[in-house]
Image (cartoon, grey):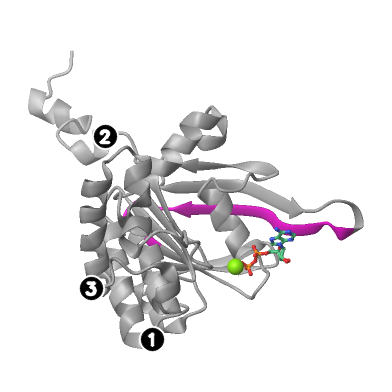
Amino acid sequence: MNDMHPLEVLQEYNVLNPEATSAPKDAAVRCNGITKSYGTGETTVQALRGVDLEVHPGELLMLVGPSGCGKTTLISVIAGILDQDDGECLLFGQNLSQLPKHERVQYRGKHIGFVFQTFNLIPSLTAAENAAIPLLINGMSMERAVEQSAKLLTSVGLEGREQALPSQLSGGQQQRVAVARALVHSPKLVVCDEPTSALDHATGRRVMEELKKLAINKDRALVIVTHDARIFEFADRIAHMNDGRIEQIGHNN
Ligand code: ADP
Ligand code: MG
């Protein structure tokens, strides 16, 4: 017979420590052995040669490396825009490639925000309409969606430009519309390809501050591909890629 006091027993089993008893949190992103090649035969390019990567909830991970090393390919696989050849990628514990196509599209539309290197705005839609697209996809009315996207445009310094078409905006302004679009639906994972490449120093910092504020909390994560050394200080960790692999990951403090 155990003569421990019941409280001691509870302590022994960590019942009084919710941290210890709750299940371990899923990684925001977990990639295991991701490979991807383009083309066939002699022209095959092996873009990813076995990538293992974990991004934690609450984290801003930056991905750096020389041109052509596979950064865009990797984040496209992570965001479910591109299928890997081999290996698996889990987002918050979910393996998207195991979901039926429509559920996968639905998951992406709801939980992922993506800033493309080339912005990919729709030429015939205004800035506010472009930034509202994820909300429209998720079934919100145009009126409400545009109202909400206008707020985000303001937060990235585009107040007054809501009605402009992409062709009437500078490259830097288009890039900020793309950032607003990636954030507007409060996704769990935001993935950005060179999000400050067209921005001056002050605007780049402002956009990074908004990204950090809106894309990260304890259940969300942000992955940014960048060459821009001026924004490295915003990262929690920096992963260095080379020739289709992650060679090193370092904490940034
Ligand atoms: P990064 O973003 O680091 O510059 P990418 O992921 O764009 O690198 O490209 C990795 C490699 O794959 C490069 O050699 C590139 O030329 C090649 N690549 C990328 N996209 C394609 C494609 N659609 N078709 C053929 N090759 C591609
Ligand atoms: Mg790229």
Of mark 2 and mark 1, the one earlier in the sequence is 2
Quadrant position of ligand 2 = bottom right
- Which residue position is annotated with label 2? 22
- Report helix, strand or loop for mark 2: loop
Span highlighted in magenta in the image: 43-60
Q: Nearer the viewer, residue 107 or 218?
A: 107
Task: Measure the alpha-carbon separation of dots 3 and 1.
Answer: 20 Å
> What number is the disc on residue 160?
3
Asked if residue 107 is among those painted magenta in the image, a careful observer would answer no
- Which residue position is annotated with label 1? 200
Residue 76 appears anywhere in the view: yes
> Which of the 4 image quarters holds residue 80?
top right
Amino acid type, residue under disc 3 in the picture? Gly
Classify residue 112 as left or right of residue 39.
left
Q: Quick check: is the Cβ at mark 3 less than 8 Å away from ligand 2?
A: no
Task: Measure the alpha-carbon separation of dots 2 and 1.
Answer: 45 Å
Amino acid type, residue under disc 1 in the picture? Asp
Amino acid type, residue under disc 2 in the picture? Ser
Q: Position of residue 108 (x, y in %)?
A: 45, 42
Looking at the rendered image, the disc whose residue lies closer to the viewer, 2 or 1, is 1
Q: Nearer the viewer, residue 81 or 93?
A: 81
- Report helix, strand or loop for mark 3: loop
- Report helix, strand or loop for mark 1: loop
